[in-house]
Image (tube, rainbow, N blue to C red):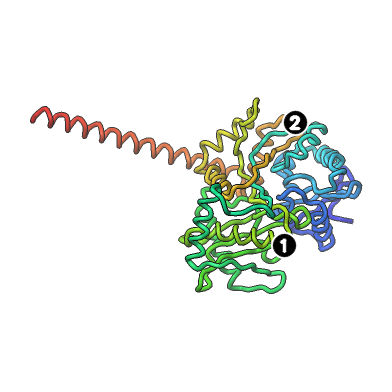
Amino acid sequence: MYGIESPRNRYKTASAASASTEEWNRALSYLRRYAENSLAYLSLEPDKEWLFSEEPEGMISFARSGNTIVVCGDPVCADEDFPEMLRVLRSFAAAERKHLVFLMTEETHVAEYQAEGFGCFKSGEEAVFDVQSWSMRGGKCAKARSSWHTAVNYGLSVQEYRPQEKRDAEIERQFHEITDAWLEEKHTARLQFAVGSLMLDHPCDKRYFYASDAEGTIQGINVLNPYLGGKGWIVDIMRRREGCPHGVMELLFHDIMEILKAEGVSQASLGVAPFFNTNDGDHPRLIEKAEHYIYENMNYIYGFKPLHAAKDKFNPQWKNIYVVCYPKHMSFWMEEAAFAVLDSQGFSDYVHAFLEMRKVQHEEKVDRKKEQRREKVDRKKEQHEEKAE
């Protein structure tokens, strides 16, 4: 028997953090066969639980928060079984007496969600690439190409690290060093659920690329997760050393794309730009307007605009991403549950960051007023001196 059976039903669940070898292999098997959503491999992160289904065959990755089950991406199953997997999950949630929220679902399944009574709201756009046709040539990639040349001229080179074959303590020490320094710069705690971790002790199918200088110092790292049976790869982690040479990320992305192209990979992703273009429809809903407000006004908490710009300079194709919920009207508590699972310290971390942002904004406003008063005094002084002359 897999995992734990609900006392009220026959549903088989397991935790990624404590899964048996049999459960782990089952989850990995489903991901290798059925993963379409680029976030699917985040199912293997320790903050996830798995709901297994035998008929139809598949799994759903989720976390619990209050009275809500928060699902990562879409159900992992064959396309023809998708509606039935939604019914399985809806039945499981009813047995657990919980609501449902899906994060980062794909537009291709919106009609199926709606047909099963779920509410769908745009939550951002994902930067995807046709690997075989993508090139850094052309005007749209001019800035990225210039940065890439800078990194090449500096003498940086890209290598792939394969911990599945042989571990290297020094490479991994530098990976952790860069990650720890990167986390210290954030205004919130480490994001999770929709963002992966290094998982060097259990890498499974991940791929690790790094850019290093002539002395062997690693200046930047990219970690990739597969989807579409290995025909698609998402750059899940992009981190660089503080004070690194300009163009490290551009060099990594360019060289990784060349490697994937040679391997016959069809699609790549740089992940989602949250809350981007959520009010672009004819009749945006309240939640989509709220997301747009966050995108425009809360970049202190999380750099939504800079994140979009960082992805857009590579000239991706942008595809819509949705948050889905059941019941179909999103409540405040369902939204709170989604934020709570995304932050390693919970929803209160966002409240703290928001208050800190307002404090900074207030201080900036006070400083502007002081500067305006000083300018006013200086102008009056100049006018008085001119009259005296």
Relative to 366, is 163 above or below? Answer: below
Residue ID for mark 1: 263
- Which image quadrant for residue 74? top right
Horizontal placement of 250 versus 383: left or right?
right
Residue 252 position, x and y percent, is: 58, 60
Q: Is residue 289 left or right of residue 374?
A: right
- Under mark 2, the amino acid is Lys
Give the farthest residue toward the left. 389
Q: What residue is pinned by disc 2?
A: 328
Amino acid of disc 1: Glu
Residue positioned most to the front: 138
Foreground mark, 1 or 2, reads 1
Element on which disc 2 rests: loop
Q: Is residue 346 above or below residue 218?
A: above
Q: Nearer the viewer, residue 67 or 152?
A: 152
What residue is rendered at 30% in x and 37% in y?
Answer: 371
Q: Earlier along the polypeptide chain: callout 1 or callout 2?
A: 1
